Amino acid sequence: MSKEKKARVSEAANEEYEEDVASEPGGVGDAGADVQVSNDQQASPVDTAQDDSAEKIALLEQEIAELKDQMLRKQADFENFRKRLIRDREDSIRFANTNLLLDLVETIDNFERAIKSAEDSKDFDTFYTGVDMIEKQLTSTLENKYGLKRFESEGEEFDPEVHEAVAAEESSDVTVQTVLQVLQKGYMLHDRVLRHAKVRVAIPAAAGQEETAQTEGSED
């Protein structure tokens, strides 16, 4: 066989071998395909996980933004509520005496009428009667509507809880310390002393002499 013929036979054998190898399962061609498929299968779960994480992060960011907005709204509502309470309390303090002042304004009106009437008539008795009537009307209003009561003290036994003694004198007409004269009347607001009555007190003469004797004995 010539050299040329041997070369053609050898080339044909090599081509046939390469075709057989490529056609067999697990050959070079299939191996390349398997590698590509394997790479696709490994990349797919990672991409899916990344997509899920991005979606969760977006949802959490949206939830945080909503919670922050709710917190800011509640904080603003609370601040407005606090300011409204302070304003209502201040108004309540400022206008607490509205009803009392309205009654006093009416009393002032009555005084103005009495003064006007006295100026026109020049009648002292009429003026006195009008002022006395206004005074009784005012004290009655204060007692009935506001619990302010003027208490009587003259002739009563001296009580330091409601009386303030500004003067004292001995008297044989009393057996206990007694209010002899009221210099300034006292007032009660409901069941509490609003102002003590300033009074002059009569002290039993015997008690006065005993106190004097005790004082002299202590000096000796």
Image (cartoon, rainbow, N blue to C red):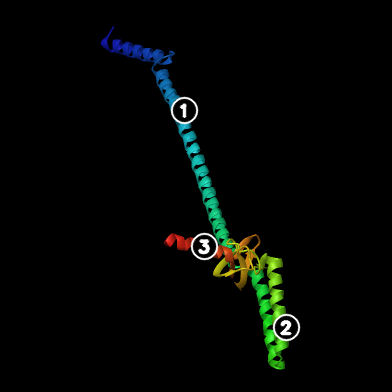
Q: Earlier in the sequence, mark 3 or mark 2?
A: 2
Instruction: Out of 33 and 104, give the one closest to the viewer.
Output: 104
Q: Are marks 1 and 2 in contact (CB under 8 Å)?
A: no
Question: Number of callouts in the render?
Answer: 3
| Residue at left offset 69%, top offset 74% | 138
Does 79 appear above or below 38? Answer: below
Label 1: which residue? 45
**Please, what secondary structure does the residue beneath circle 1 have?**
helix
Q: Nearer the viewer, mark 1 or mark 2?
A: 2
Tell me the crowding category of disc 3: few under 14, some 14 to 19, or many 20 or more residues within 10 angstroms, Cα based.
Answer: few
Rounded to the nearest angstrom, the CA distance separating label 1 from label 3 is 112 Å
Q: Quadrant of the C terminus?
A: bottom left
Mark 3 sits on what residue?
Answer: 211
Q: Is residue 91 visible?
A: no
Question: In front: 30, or 168?
Answer: 168
Q: Which residue is denoted by mark 2 in the rendering?
A: 129
Residue 104: percent from the left, percent from the top?
66, 75
